[in-house]
Amino acid sequence: MAKKPVAAAAVLSQRSRRAPHVSRGASNTYDWQQRIDGIVAGTRLAFTLCALLAIIVDLSDPARNAPPIHGIVLVYACYSIGTMALAWSSVASLSQRARFGTQIVDVGVALLLIALSGGPQSPFSSLVVFPLLSASLRWRWRGAIWTGGSLLAVYGGVVLHIVPSRGRAEPDLNSLIIAGAYLVAVTLILAYLSCQGDRLQREMGAVAAWKPSQSDEVDGPLRDLLGHVASVVDAPRVLLVWQVVDQPLMTLALWTHGQLRSTTDVPAVLEPSVAEPLRDRNFLCRDAAQSNASVVCMTHGEPRHWRGSPLGDGFCSAFAIRAVMAVRLDHPLLRGRLFVLDKPAATSDDLALVTVVARQVENTLENDYRARRLRESTLALERNRVAGELHDGVLQWLAAAALRLEAIRSRLAVDRTAALDEVQELQTMIVHQQRELRSFVRELKTGRSPNDFGLGDLLAILAFRIEQEWQLAVKLDLKLPPERFEASISPELAREIHQIVREALVNAARHTLASLACVSVRLEGGWVRITVEDNGQGFPFRGRFEDTELAQRGLGPVMLRQRVAALGGRLVIETGEDGARLEIDLPQPGTVGGVNPAGSRPNPASASAMSGPLSPGPQQESRRTDLRRIRGHRSTR
């Protein structure tokens, strides 16, 4: 039974070796040189068929040259069919040697047919266009120039040899001049078109190959961006002026031969940068210093001419601008203009290229703006988080310690022993708070929380410490077994819930003079529902208020309200003379009703292991000690 899979694998291996990796159709589609070979072969066959038709319909001097011309055209037709079949059926393109050989054959056949059928007045004179076209396709402008020069030299020599022998110099000379001029014109046009194609391909390749700079320097990305513009357009200077929508100042950056100068302190004399009639247009001018300069501006993609001074006098003199191309930056987040300076003999094609590159500049500036806003937003959130941690932790504990010290000082005169016991308890609290603060600093440095306790343990420790520090009795009511909480609430969300409940309890003990608080936590429909009630005097305001109204009227604890809002939760406060009730709903990220969308619940052990280091730190030991004291305290009740 074990031999069958091995045999099948061997058969499949042999078949895979026999199968081609690339299909011929794919090669014909994606090989650019092979496509050109196919086009040249098809055009050659079309010219040959036309020549054959010309022979059948009308032949100059048929008595003398008909048989050799017939033979040459028929052989050339067979040759054309064969080269076309080879070009369209071959997996790989022709070699350079083969292309050069076919080019020599095409030139020789064209000249031979012209020589045998009347010289300059031959009906086959148009066949010289085909070698020129194929050479310009294969070797671009160099091929057109070399082929055109060779054809002109050989054709002129052959015709000059034929004219004296026939004694008709004057008519043949006229035909020679016309045919030569035609050949020169076609050669120059094809060479120019090939040069333009090479230039367009080179410029588009440079535009497409550009990547945003990864420089760590302050002005490195901007310098590389403007250097990219200068290299694509082939200009010595590039000037960029722009303003972001939420910034009051303009920014000006000048790139000159690899050096960048930028400033946000733009003098008023530099405004306006362009003339009012050109404010919404892209334009070019070869001498902007003239008061009546000729300006080519683009309107709906069409060039229009305008006369006048295209730039502001102060702007033009400040940068010694002569030749200029200016393109607007048209983006909802920024406005400005890109100036390409000192490019000689700029054309409307160059202006179109600058317009394309300006879109890259817009996208780069937009990405930089959004990245900067994201960094600022992230820093603001982190600052708020640190401020909240300090407010809810150290500051509130210092307030509690101050109250305890005041009570100890009052008790020293009455019961010194009891006062010393409270001093010892306060020292223990200070040690615990030092560990908490050290753990918080470590978390800021490493980005990881050393906490490996679940929500139930965190709330139990919190209740115990609130009773010690604020003399507020706390009753916990967890609606589900602790393992359900550990599986459904992430360590990050557990810490946030811990901070929210601590803020609510400290506010109840400090401001409402409450003696008892009840904390209820339950899971319901993908939400963590938290309720904190106390028997104090309530808030200064009375009634039931939701978070939107609390924010509008500036009511309730600010830090608590901001923390709940940052988590995407909801807050409702109901307050009266018999106490206050806080209802807090927090969403569970990545879960629906406390259940993982994939259908499985997270492993509490793995979640605990991932939330902190493997070895217990000072904070873990402190909280374990608190848990042992809590259990011992409850067992003595």
Image (cartoon, grey):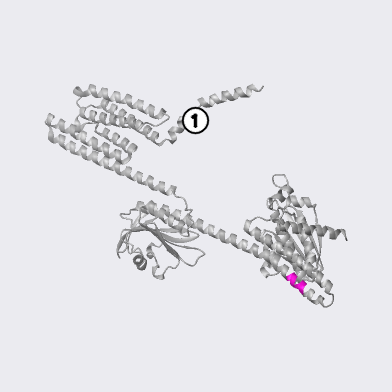
Q: Where is residue 339 drawn, in percent x and y?
A: 38, 59
**Farthest bottom residue?**
413
The reply to whether residue 593 is in sight is no
Q: Secondary structure at mark 1?
A: loop
Q: What secondary structure characterizes most of the magenta part? A: helix
Q: Which residue is mark 1?
A: 21
Residue farthest to the right, as pictured: 637
* 118 with respect to 376 (left or right): left
Image coords of residue 461 (percent x, y): 77, 60
What stretch of residues is rendered in magenta?
399-405
In the foreground, 305 or 72 = 72
The foreground one among 182 and 171 is 182
Instruction: Please state which amino acid type lies under the numbered disc 1.
Output: His
Left/right of residue 124 with respect to residue 272 in the rendered view: left
Magenta run includes residue 407 = no
Q: Residue at x 33, y 27 (%)?
A: 80
Q: Is residue 367 visible?
A: yes
Q: Nearer the viewer, residue 391 or 64?
A: 391
Position of the N terminus, as image quadrant, is top right
Label 1: few (<14), some (14–19) or many (≥20) C-alpha neighbours in 10 Å: few
Quadrant the C terminus occupies: bottom right
The extreme left residue here reads 167
